[in-house]
Amino acid sequence: MDENLDHQYEAEQRLGKVFMTFSILTILIACIGLLGLAAFATAQRTKEIGIRKVLGASSGGVVGLLCRDFVRLVCWPMS
């Protein structure tokens, strides 16, 4: 009887593994996309960052300035 039940759920277990694999792959691609977006935004604002640093801005302030846009992008659909 145990072998019968194992055989019935074997296909569902394989399907679960496939979904888990594709879920991890999707999250990985999304993270790479956010990293690319951050690098692009930083490259676009290099002069602004340099001017802010020369005028005495802290590193935390500059990072906060860059992160604020991404936090809005990530959290806006939830609200």
Image: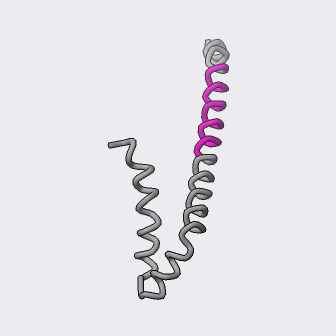
Q: Main secondary structure of the magenta part?
A: helix
Q: How many marks?
A: 0
User: Which of the 4 image quarters holds residue 52?
Assistant: bottom left
In the picture provided, is 10 more to the left or to the right than 65?
Answer: right
Q: Closest to the observer: 25 or 12?
A: 25
Residue at left 49%, top 82%? 51
Is 73 above or below relative to 17?
Answer: below
User: Which of the 4 image quarters holds residue 15?
Assistant: top right
Q: Closest to the observer: 35 or 17?
A: 35
In the picture provided, is 1 more to the left or to the right than 73?
Answer: right
User: Which of the 4 image quarters holds residue 2?
Assistant: top right
In the picture provided, is 68 more to the left or to the right than 50?
Answer: left
Is 19 above or below relative to 78?
Answer: above
In the image, which residues are magenta?
11-27
In the picture provided, is 28 more to the left or to the right than 69?
Answer: right
Quadrant for the C terminus in the image: top left
Q: In the displayed orientation, state which residue is furthest to the left.
A: 79
Is 28 above or below relative to 65?
Answer: above
Judge whether residue 20 is colored magenta: yes
- Locate residue 7, reporting x and y percent: 67, 16
- Locate residue 62, reporting x and y percent: 45, 74
Which scheme is used to colour this image of the protein?
Answer: one colour
Judge whether residue 43 is colored magenta: no
- Locate residue 50, reporting x and y percent: 52, 81
- Locate residue 55, reporting x and y percent: 43, 87
Residue at left 41%, top 69%? 64
Q: Closest to the observer: 71 or 19?
A: 71
Quadrant for the N terminus in the image: top right
